[in-house]
Image (cartoon, rainbow, N blue to C red):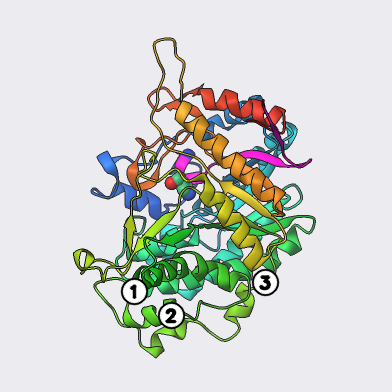
Amino acid sequence: MTTKLKFPQGFFWGTATSSYQIEGAWNEDGKGESIWDRFSHTPGHIERGEMGNVACDHYHRWQEDIAIHKELGVNGYRFSISWPRILPQGRGAVNPKGLDFYSRLVDGLLEAGIQPFVTLYHWDLPQALQDEGGWPARATAEAFVEYADVVSRRLGDRVKHWMTLNEPWCSSLLGYQIGEHAPGHHDWKSALAAAHHLLLGHGLALPAIRRNSPQSEVGIVLNLIPTEPASPSPEDYDAFRYFDGFFNRWFLDPVFGRGYPADKVLEYAAQGFLPPTIPLTDGDWGFVKSGDLQAIAQPIDFLGVNYYSRSVQRSPVIPEHQNQPRTVHVAPESEWTEMRWEVFPEGLYRLLNRVNYEYQPRKIYITENGASYSDGPDAAGQIHDERRIAYLRSHLEAAHRAIQNGVPLAGYFTWSIMDNFEWAHGFAQRFGLYWVDFATQKRLPKDSALWYRQVIAGNGLTI
Ligand code: IFM
């Protein structure tokens, strides 16, 4: 017997991308340098020395890319705007060709019956702003407001769905503490200040976007990782609490008006989160000015949730883990994607319920979900990416269950329409529904694209 899992009427089915990962044209038509240009041009940062100078050449092939979206039948497409394409120096002089590019893209999407879901910041900060201190500097939050104002003034009559930031955890922690992302720094205090200024930029930009685009909805996109303790021991519970605090609640709590998490997380922050420990004295929290938390907590119309996997946490006080970071990811016996991320659809169900129950967002979109598998064309040019289909199917089934449970889920955007530049991993990690031959820029539908088309056409799944 087969069961049909129908999604609500008007549900958004889409795909997602970001500017640096697909556009290329890194120095064309007046675009300024971004921190990802600088980072990837510096040897040692990206696997095999790859870089996004050309990527999927979407800047020149955007019409073809709209056409493949039309073929899929999506009614939404989430993409990001390159800040240095609009404001090459981060603030001040506007580059009209940059604005024109996105204006044409928006018009093309609307003509194809596809709603643009626009992310303002998906990590490509203008290098000029990084040279003045980057996100650890408060002035960057102010520049972000100027940028959001310029873009929403131009596109606000047509764009009805805005996202301020994508995954501020990555822009702050991965960029300024762990150093795996641009600008590649290793400084815990800067990372904390960066996280705060990203959130502040989000909060301060909301009124400008609402003013310029009054008929639209505005939200933020967080990458959230449901987490659990590896054992019932108090130590592992502590590790789990801490990880949840520093990864999920650090962003959810202030956005939903609760300030920064006051439990273990602040306590540990005061001792230094990760080795080498850098104690934070009281004075170090000085970057949180009075009124900031209110600004960050401006009401949003939706929360964008990016979900890929879960994390099981073990405490390093267990002898074999001593001298390791405060929490240790444990790899359960399971199935993994090529990113070494566990396939765990139940995590999406739990996460959506938890966010709904604890924070009560007005609406939720799954703004990213997908899997990296490198299955390529066979002799007949077909791509049988069965594992991706299984991944997407199981996650959609979990999303459907969450809706049945009362979660106000209004759309699903798979990452990604096509293989693209996967940051520090370069081009080897392929998340696309379309295979991209980076030598010829040919896009080839994988079996998952054909499968997704059917799901969209039927507004649901048959299981
Ligand atoms: O490619 C990224 C994207 O830029 C942000 N979210 C996770 C994706 C897969 O790693």
| Residue most extreme to the bottom | 282
Q: Quadrant of residue 351?
A: bottom right
On the image, the x and y values in percent for residue 385 come to 46, 26
In this image, 214 relative to 461: left or right?
Answer: right
Give the amino acid at mark 3: Gln
Which residue in the protein does label 1 denote? Answer: 273
Residue 40 falls within the magenta-colored stretch: no
Which residue in the protein does label 2 denote? Answer: 266
Q: Quadrant of residue 451?
A: top right
First-in-chain label (1 vs 2): 2
Disc 2 crowd, CA 10 A, few/some/many (<14, 14-19, 20+): some
Question: Is residue 2 shown above or below 110?
Answer: above
Please report the residue visible at 24 percent of the width from the left and 73 percent of the height from the top.
276
Disc 1 crowd, CA 10 A, few/some/many (<14, 14-19, 20+): many
Give the amino acid at mark 1: Phe
Please report the residue visible at 76 percent of the width from the left and 50 percent of the height from the top.
157
On the image, the x and y values in percent for residue 438 come to 40, 28
Of labels 3 and 1, the one closer to you: 1
Q: Which mark is residue 60?
A: none
On the image, the x and y values in percent for residue 342 come to 41, 45
First-in-chain label (3 vs 1): 1
Give the amino acid at mark 2: Leu
Question: Is residue 397 shown above or below 325?
Answer: above
Whether residue 135 is visible, yes or no, is: no
Which residue in the protein does label 3 denote? Answer: 298
The answer to whether mark 1 and mark 2 are in CB contact below 8 A is no
Q: In this picture, which residue range is highlighted in magenta?
A: 1-21
Please report the residue visible at 65 percent of the width from the left and 59 percent of the height from the top.
219
